[in-house]
Amino acid sequence: MEVTTAQTAAASGLWHNNSVLVQITGLSPLLALTTTATTALGLGLATALVTVSACITCSLLRAWLPEQWRLVYYLAIVAFFTTVIGLILEMSFYPLHRQLGIYLPLICANGAILLRMETFSRHHRLLPSLQDALATALGFLWLIVLLGALRELTAYGTVFAHLDLLKPGRVDQYAEPGSASFRFSVLQPGALIILGLLVAGLNLLNRRRSATKTVAAANLVRIKRVRVTGRP
Amino acid sequence: MNRNSMPGKPVKAIKSVRLHGGIRPPPFKTRSLRSVIMATPVPEHLIIPLIQYGGQIAAPAVAVGDKVLKGQALTRIDLEGICPIHAPTSGTIEAIEPLPVADEFTTYQPCVVLRSDGEDCWTALDALPDWDTSPPEDLISRIHRAGVIGLGGAGFPLAKKLHSLQGRKLETLIINAVECEPYISCDQALVRARTADLVSGIQILRYITGATRTVIAIGNNKTDAIDALRQHLPRTEIRLVTVPPDYPAGSEKQLIQRIVRRQLPRDALPADIGALVVNAGTAYAVFRAIVLGQPLVSRITTLCGETLATPKNFEALIGTPVFFLLELCGVDYQRLSHLLCGGSIMGHTVTDLNVPLDKTTNCLIAGSEQEFPTLPEPMECIRCGYCASACPVSLQPQLLYRHIRAGALEQAEQSGVQDCIECGACNWVCPSHIPLLQYYRYAKYELESLAARRLQSQQWQQRFELHQYRMARKHKSKPQQKPDDRIAGADAAIPQFDRNQARIEIAAAVERARARRENLIASSAQAINSHEPLTAVRKTKIENPHQ
Amino acid sequence: MLWVIAACIPAIITATWFFGYGMLLNILQCGFWAALLETIVARLRRQVWNGLLRDNSALVSAILLGISLPPGSVWWLVLLGMVFALLVAKHAFGGLGHNPFNPAMCGYVMLLLSFPLQMTAWHIPMAEIRYDPLFSPLQFESLTTSIALAFPFLAPGPVADFRAVADGLVMATPLIEQKLAGNSAVFAALDSGNSLFSRSSGTGWELINLGFLLGGLLLLFRKIISWHIPVSVIAAVAVMSILFYSDKSMNVVGSTYLHLFGSATMIGAFFIATDPVSAATTPVGKIVYGLLIGGVIYWIRVWGSYLDAVAFAVLVGNFCAPLIDQLTLPRIYGHYRRTGPWK
């Protein structure tokens, strides 16, 4: 998959090779933290920042990355940026940081980021890598926010109810979400099922758009079957 | 089935008493058993198929226009493993040509067409009433020359089966008169009507094999046949064993397990575990072949089905057209919708009424639409497991079906699809009317072609590697040239372009090509005319590409 | 499938006799939604619509869900459960024969996880609210109450919510009530000369379970189901409860009798775990599957946070069924050992 222009890179990252919808990577934060649109947005932004900075770094350092130990270096790069972002969040966005909990450090184990570094940034110059990383990050972001919004909507009937979590501020401003009216979509199985429905919707759209029409099987010859064991 | 055992290889025993599965379909045998066995009149034309067990074609020993007598061999008798075929009546050979036969797809196979002269005159017969004085090898060769094959269904040559003992001692000789499939009643009719002859045929087989134990197995609902045997058996050492009328109790594997209480390992022959199963009809044919010297020219076959006015068992000549037999029973062509060859579970439909009766046709069912109604569309499998409890070889048909539907043939193979004996019990019990057996046949066929493709690609690779090796060797043995010299020489070779010279060279090249082509055509024509296998031509081509 | 429905009838009649029209109303509702949803699905999947009559499987799912829901459940709860059971758990996986999980139990678990309050609010049997031996829950008043509970918009006035009374008092099954602990209410009623069917005798749940047992035996007798799964489920529950029961213990573990007849074990063993599509199918596999379900039932009941665990246990069993099948393939004729990918 050779991305040449910014447009195709964007289309690929946002739609055709969306890291969630198509590649189904990075599921653990996706399922755990999309209970509300706000936390989803927070995590999505953090992941996006890490993705872009890690991919740029990887692209810049590509001449010095040893072939055999590259995965270790990837992890080190991602962990570095994750730590930086975690520290920033802890300093200025403490409520959000507390909400994200363990899943913030876990960004460094996100398969989608490692995959981009391994398959793209390692082989490309700065600009294409930046394009690709941005597309991937935005693709992850819109999907995680959509999933969060859907889950929040079905569970609590609101969208972006606690947006003030994203404002830099003090600890006591945060209010816990109330008890869900439809608790199922707060739970992980519900998240998986909603994600499954989204993937199904994507497949449906793609199939509608694709021009190839399969020949209808209506004119297949029906073969008559016979019971050969006497009366049943 | 896997029959790739090494001769004389010792086989580990699988002791198992309990038989698994089986079904009990309604027998539908009473109508055809009302009358005695009737000999058919000789039809005007007889069509004798030359196809043999395993798809081999017997080489004809007669030519069109020859006059033959009843019992005269139509094919060469000296070929190892191929049973000869004999003229069912006296008359003239009218043609040797492909005609439809009663196989699974009613294909065209080479047949001898014999026009009867109405005399029905036997050739000189070599009868041997005191068989117990001649050596068993002589008897086996007589059986071979008489063209006796297994009359139960598959048609495996009996002489070959007896040879599979290879001098080993036989523990149990099993005469199979179980006949568990619905509709078929020819063995029952034979046992109750020709008991004495049958018993003497069994005695001959016992003498040949030297079996320590001889058993005749029969379904316990065939009371008349059992009574007839009870009258004849006490004077002999043959034991009578009655088996429940389950299907497929008469299948070779199931019968062996029931009687010797051991299962037949999948890579072994029955002889490897000291057992041999011979059909009752075959034993009777042995009696005729040895004691009377008559080759196998007729067999007992059941004609039944709703559209026949008088279903009965016929002693019919091999090669009698099916329509001739049907008309003898008063067939109602208006109602005839399915003609089945074989029993109602394992039999196959025949689409041409001109097909002849061959040695393995044990039953012909002329069924009506009411008798064999069209099945509804198959529904989804709900894994009820009825098939698994019916399977006589303990497969899990519902899992196999799932694998095959998913295209996971390898997994189906691992779960044992190759061990399916194709008895059709699963089809019979399936409440969703799924054609399970057809799925397994498909899977087996696909696996077979997959294996063939794999083998072929292996051979290709091997050939390529050999080629590589030869090239490398050739290159090594060549004296090395200095690269600089070669380039200089090449430059010198094309100094300037000469039109005339070029024309002469082109003409010479065209001539060479033409000669080569003609040579090739001539050699292949010669090869075809001299009936050489085509591979010989290909071989020369490959070996001398620049001749 | 019709036999399965027929086998449910004794238990349904008993339940109605003791607890009023609620469960009947549930089943009718479930059946209606099932018919509607199946029609929609057939349309969506471009199949020929044969309704419920083609295989009745949706009807069986509807009846099982209807029995499991608290009597007189509100309509949207029932609809949601059926939507999840039929659309997500069954047709999203390819329809009948392709669903890896039991649809009715998927719907039930989804509802239990989402609406714990509504799903545990079993309306107290009327006979126990009014300690009046002559009062019958089959009276017209009871029917109107049930309808009003199920369809609040039909009720003329505010519905008297029994939940306030019932919450914490009555559960789906008397498993933790200890009322039946250790001894049988049926025998107690017989000993004291009470009528078994008098609604104040306290024999309600026991008789319902006996009804399921009767229906299950009918299914066994008709060879609709094989003995392996029910026997092994019941055996596992019985053995676990015998091993762990102690009347001196402070924990609520319950006696063997309570586990078998004071809970949902019977319907689970005979009607839910035996659903052939999602169960294991090899002979040994069925026993392993049943033991697993029985063990998990007891495990969750006693050491878990849910009161009754048949639905969860059956789903756990469904998860393991394909693996169990592959590991327990029987020895094929003529093979020296068992076959399978791991052999």
Image (cartoon, rainbow, N blue to C red):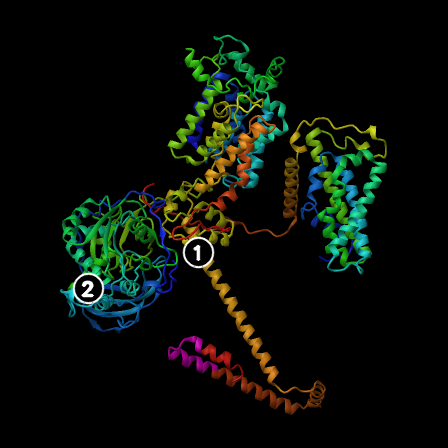
Say what amino acid the circle numbered 2 marks. Ala
Give the class, few, some or many, for how many residues have Cα within 10 Å of label 2's Cα (few <14, many ≥20). Answer: many
Secondary structure at badge 2 equals helix
Please report whichever mark, 2 or 1, sits nearer to the chain's N-terminal start: 2
> Compared with residue C228, is residue C31 higher up or lower down, i.e. above or below?
above
* Nearer to the camera, B488 or C297: C297
Report whether mark 2 lies on the same chain as mark 1.
yes
Can you see residue C41?
no
Front position in the image: B44 or C281: C281
Relative to C70, C191 lies left or right: left
The residue that label 1 is drawn on is B444
Please tell me which residue is depicted at 52% across the width and 17% down the height of the picture. C179
Q: Quadrant of the N terminus of chain B?
A: bottom left
Q: Along the line of sight, which residue is nearer the eye, A44 or C297?
A: C297
For the stretch drawn in magenta, the main secondary structure is helix
Instruction: Check the residue under mark 1 and report the chain it is in.
Output: B
Q: In screen coordinates, is B465 left or right of A143?
A: left
Rendering coords of residue A17 (x, y %): 70, 50
* Chain to which the residue tagged by mark 2 belongs: B
Residue assigned mark 2: B289
Label 2 and label 1: CA atoms lie apart by: 38 Å
Looking at the picture, which amino acid does disc 1 mark?
Lys
Residue A135 pos. (x, y %):
76, 49
Position of residue C29 relative to residue B103, above or below, is above
Please state the horizontal and vertical placement of residue B381, each as a whole percent of the image.
46, 42
List x then y, in percent, for residue B201.
19, 59
Q: Element type at marker 1? A: helix
Q: Residue at x 36, y 63 (%)?
A: B9
Question: Which quarter of the picture shows residue C9?
Answer: top left
Hey, which quadrant is residue B82 in on the image?
bottom left
* Residue at image point 47% right, 45% down: C328
Magenta region? B520-536
